[in-house]
């Protein structure tokens, strides 16, 4: 991201330097013709800021549609600021936005504080998504951390950043954070009492992520269903069955029940296959045929060798 920002800023910086030198030289020769060049440099500064931020957005947002939407919003915001500055309306607009429209005790809410809080919340939500992607897929796996643990740490980091963004937005709005913390604590206690199932699934999700006994891609049997783990979330996990159906299971299902995980441990597994034959068949001949079929299978190992057991 830093490399892209530096690369994108080369041309605007050179343009500002060349424009400043040219205008300074023009003021020396014709001061009556060349006025204050701060306005022109402000326009060049607008392009500099936009190119730097655009370079960072290209690095941090691989999604083309999301990147274009962010770029358009950023362009409109920067253009509005520079246009108001050029017209001399920026100060009056800022004074208007700073007028309080809601006052309660020591708290004063203005239009500017609301816009700032919305921008801060959007920034933290975006930063949380980028942090989750970079930590879970690039940084932590390259440090040798197991993918499941890296994904869990990245998910926790994302939610922490969102919580920080909420408190930051409330602080910008003028709320007393100590009062808010007490209120959220009481609210959290009430929610925890009433939504014990959701809290149980949330804690179970954290246990699954950090424990690593069940990982994405594992093949297991849970609640009488065979399937492959597609995703482990904080509340529920997605299991794809052999029939191709995606089953959304609460995380408490995995922590409260015995799960058969065929992908856990080593790859040596004993598979039992029940075969019914006629009572008139020769048991010795049946055994020899089954062992011959097993020996022809490439995934069968020699030690321990396959065996045939007669039942019923």
Image: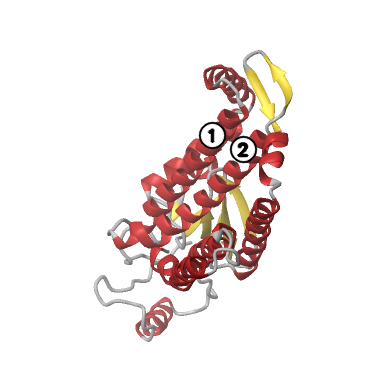
The colour scheme of the drawn protein is secondary structure
In this view, the residue farthest toward the right is 101
Tally of marks: 2
Q: Residue 7, percent across and down?
A: 42, 72
Query: Few, some or many C-alpha atoms within 10 Å of disc 1 (few <14, some 14-19, many ≥20)?
Result: some
Q: Residue 149, percent across and down?
A: 37, 51
Residue identified by numbered label 1: 168
Q: Cβ–Cβ below 8 Å for labels 1 and 2?
A: yes
Image mark for residue 117: 2
Image mark for residue 204: none
The quadrant in which residue 297 appears is: bottom left
- The structure residue drawn at horizontal position 45% and vertical position 63%, both measured from the top left corner, is 311
Answer whether residue 257 is visible to the viewer in this image: no
- The structure residue drawn at horizontal position 49% and vertical position 42%, both measured from the top left corner, is 161
Q: Is 84 left, or right, of 167 in this rendering? A: right
Q: Quadrant of the N terminus?
A: bottom left
Structural distance between the alpha carbons of marks 1 and 2: 8 Å
Please name whichever residue, 132 or 127, is drawn nearer the observer in this view of the structure. 127
Please name whichever residue, 142 or 299, is drawn nearer the observer in this view of the structure. 142
- The structure residue drawn at horizontal position 38% and vertical position 58%, both measured from the top left corner, is 147
Answer whether residue 63 is visible to the viewer in this image: yes
């Amino acid at each position: 991201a830093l490399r892209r920002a530096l690369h994108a800023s080369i041309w605007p910086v050179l343009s500002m330097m060349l424009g400043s030198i040219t205008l300074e030289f023009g003021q020396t020769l014709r001061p009556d013709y060349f006025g204050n060049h701060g306005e022109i440099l402000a326009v060049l500064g607008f392009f500099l800021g936009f190119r730097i931020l655009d370079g960072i957005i290209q690095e941090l947002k691989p999604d083309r549609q999301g990147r274009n939407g962010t770029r358009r919003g950023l362009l409109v915001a920067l253009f509005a600021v520079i246009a108001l500055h050029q017209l001399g309306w920026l100060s009056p607009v800022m004074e208007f936005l700073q007028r309080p429209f809601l006052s309660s005790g020591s708290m004063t809410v203005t239009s500017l504080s609301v816009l700032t809080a919305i921008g801060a919340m959007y920034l933290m939500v975006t930063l949380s998504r980028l942090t989750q992607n970079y930590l879970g897929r690039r940084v932590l796996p390259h440090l040798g951390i197991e993918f499941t643990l890296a994904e869990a740490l990245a998910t926790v980091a994302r939610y922490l950043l969102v919580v920080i963004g909420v408190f930051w937005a409330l602080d910008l709005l003028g709320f007393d954070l100590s009062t808010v913390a007490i209120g959220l604590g009481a609210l959290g206690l009430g929610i925890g009492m009433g939504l014990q199932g959701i809290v149980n699934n949330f804690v179970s999700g954290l246990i699954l992520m950090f424990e690593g006994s069940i990982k994405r891609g594992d093949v297991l049997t849970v609640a009488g269903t065979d399937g492959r783990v597609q995703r482990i979330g904080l509340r529920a996990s997605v299991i794809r069955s052999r029939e191709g159906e995606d089953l959304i299971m609460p995380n408490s299902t995995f922590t409260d029940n015995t799960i058969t995980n065929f992908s856990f441990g080593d790859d040596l597994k004993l598979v039992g296959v029940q075969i019914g034959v006629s009572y008139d068949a020769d048991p010795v001949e049946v055994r020899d045929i089954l062992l011959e079929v097993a020996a022809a299978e490439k995934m069968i190992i020699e030690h321990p060798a396959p065996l045939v057991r007669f039942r019923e």
